[in-house]
Amino acid sequence: MGEKIEKICGLLDIIKEYLLEFEKETIEIITCDSESIEGHSQNRVTITEKMDVVFKQIDEICKDMERGAEIRKIIKNVALFTSVDPELEPVFFKAQNIFSLLSRIKDSDIQAYGRVNLERDTLLKKIREMNSGQEAKAAKFKIGTDTNENKAYLGFSKKSI
């Protein structure tokens, strides 16, 4: 069983590294220029997909273990330290490091969502201004007076009217 616990601890270390990358991408969303937000958001999606794969690997290992249910509780943060067997303490401590990192990421995530919403609102305001400005009115006038012979009106071409 010790070998499987070591394997799980190694996988938890991989998850921790992914979370650190995720946190870095989240902070980039907060501070980067607006054109880079989409790329950093996509990177976050990719990182979470990689973490899902690692969590599935841990779940597969736990299925074959006598104390797999206990390990799952530790990893889901529903086990108290006092109820953890000393043999499973390394998993508990690695999981606790992950939970503290997740807590820190939540704060950054709120700021990242705020930044995305701010950029969205700014773009919507610019769109509204462009649609109500002189350029928009001139464009509407131009469309109505365009003499292009191939334009259609109510399904008929101008040539057939």
Image: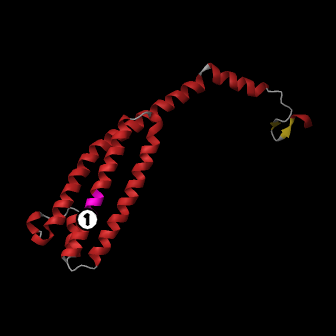
In the rendered view, would you say 47 is above or below 92?
above
Mark 1 crowdedness (10 Å alpha carbons): few <14, some 14-19, many ≥20: some
Q: Residue at x 19, y 72 (%)?
A: 70
Residue 12 location, quadrant: bottom left
Residue furthest to the right: 160
Give the residue pinned by disc 1: 10
Residue 37 x, y percent position in the rendering = 44, 40
Residue 150 location, quadrant: top right
For badge 1, the amino acid type reads: Gly
Q: Left of 126 or right of it: where is 99?
A: left
Q: Residue at x 25, y 68 (%)?
A: 8
Majority secondary structure in the magenta region: helix
Image quadrant occupied by the C terminus: top right
Choose between 130 and 89: the one closer to the eye. Answer: 89
Query: Is 12 inside the magenta-drawn segment?
Result: yes
In the rendered view, would you say 136 is above or below 32?
above
Q: Is residue 139 visible?
A: yes
The residue stretch that appears in magenta = 11-15
In the rendered view, would you say 151 is above or below 92?
above
In the rendered view, would you say 8 is above or below 14?
below
Residue 11 x, y percent position in the rendering = 28, 64
Q: Left of 79 or right of it: where is 133?
A: right
Mark 1 falls on what kind of element?
helix
Choose between 126 and 13: the one closer to the eye. Answer: 13
Query: Is 65 inside the magenta-drawn segment?
Result: no
Residue 125 x, y percent position in the rendering = 50, 28
| Colour scheme employed for the rendering of this structure | secondary structure
